Amino acid sequence: MRNMAIALIACVVVFPAMAYAAIAPPSNVIAQDTPNDIGGQIDVTWALSPDDNSTAASGIKGYVIYRAVVDTAEGLESTADVTTLAGTEPVGDVAYGISKFLDENATAGMTYTYGVAAVTNNAMSAISVAELNVTARMNYFNMGKIWFGIIMLIISGVVVFFVRHAKRGGEVKVRKIAGLEAVTEAVGRATEMGREVLFVPGILDINDIQTVAGMTVLSSVAKTAAEYDAQLEVPTARSLVMTTARETVEAAYLSAGRPDAYDENKIYYLTDEQFGYTAGIQGKMVRDKPAACFYMGAFYAESLILAETGNSIGAIQIAGTAMPSQLPFFVAACDYTLIGEEFFAASAYLSGDAEQLGSLKGQDIGKLIAAGLLILGCLFATLAATTHSPGMVATRDYIQENILGKVGFWPAESAPTAEESGDGQ
């Protein structure tokens, strides 16, 4: 459509006699400020040209939208001169059969007038100009997010309630996570066998949330290793991860009352290169045969190599990651696997901190609310499709558009979609 618009501009300049052909123009052009935005969008609607039958056979290929800045006080109700629009470049275009356009390049506080013309392959109609000018206004409150705000307030209230409940000594029940319960067993076995505990924190840097979650588990593993007098080794693929791991392990040894047993040389940097790092760890595992291997963080193709190598040497293996494509490899080759949110919940689970446990419980309630709304939406959608009851249809639409969508409390005509408007491209 962009090429079509460029061709039409050239047509107006080179062949002025063909600029306005015997094509019925669109009518009833209306430009309105888009609600609930920051003042950068204008909705433009019009009635289709009488020559447009919404098929290619009509000869009309689409509509070109023009815009001109009105150099006058805000709120002036008369339109700009039509000749001003005729000399401007289009701000966008849409295909035939479409009567909406979303101008996303407006400037807040500016007043505009809009016009629309129908076009064919080699000609265009006269430009129909909107009767009223429009001013792009910034909205301080997005009324379409009211339901989102209500749900967030409910979830926040639940979080505060459970945090206070936990701080007063109340019980916050959290499902047991087998992989975290097995940390003591794995470190104890390594101590009995006189072999090392290997902890692999993934291959991404410390700015990745999975690496941060891995550091939380490392703290618990290090504290248990200090208490059991087991040797802990942490090879890393990033220098910042190495520094963070050293501080984490040192703090854990200090907390366990064994600062003298901490050895920073056991926490070292190998390489940033993915398979070079994997080969280094694999060689270490084959030579030293650690009794327990922990894989906690972000992993890619190296997950299968590491897990299979650890399995071949008979080590207890506990893995945790949020990478869906790597979970099957860990599940197949490891004794325990923390799947997705279990991995992220490790911090609250291991620490027992009231604030973290309350936050975890509040998030679970939030998920239940979201799941409940989705189930209700599916239920009413099914009933509306099978019974065709007006009440069911209205309820389904309200959940879909107002609660889960962006309409807000009261029904309102939604803005043109990107597909309808062409995004002005």
Image: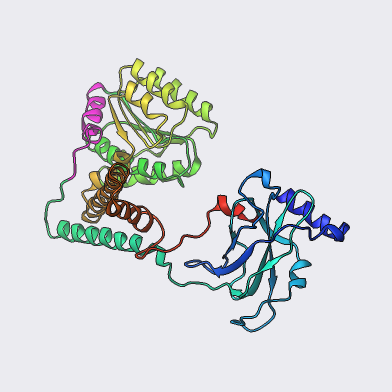
Is the stretch drawn in magenta largely helix, strand or loop? helix
User: Could you tell me residue 164's position as x and y percent?
Assistant: 18, 61
Res 115 quadrant in image: bottom right
348 is higher (above) or lower (below) than 115: above
Task: Give the residue at x 74% y 48%.
Answer: 3
Does 334 sit left or right of 3 as displayed? left
Does 115 sit left or right of 314 as displayed? right
219 is higher (above) or lower (below) than 409: above
- Residue 259 visible in image: no
User: Could you tell me residue 14's position as x and y percent?
Assistant: 88, 57
Task: Give the residue at x 58% y 57%.
Answer: 99
28 is higher (above) or lower (below) than 101: below
Is residue 226 found inside the magenta-colored segment of the image? no
Number of callouts: 0
- Residue 92 visible in image: yes
User: Could you tell me residue 157's position as x and y percent?
Assistant: 24, 62
In this view of the protein, which residue sits in the foreground, 345 or 37?
Answer: 37
Farthest-out residue, top: 312
Farthest-out residue, bottom: 73
Does 113 sit left or right of 399 as displayed? right
Is residue 177 found inside the magenta-colored segment of the image? yes
Task: Give the residue at x 31% y 47%.
Answer: 388
User: Could you tell me residue 59's position as x and y percent?
Assistant: 71, 47
User: Where are the magenta residues, as a range?
Assistant: 174-193
Task: Give the residue at x 32% y 35%.
Answer: 339
Q: Colour mode?
A: rainbow
Res 398 quadrant in image: bottom left
Does 251 sit left or right of 271 as displayed? left
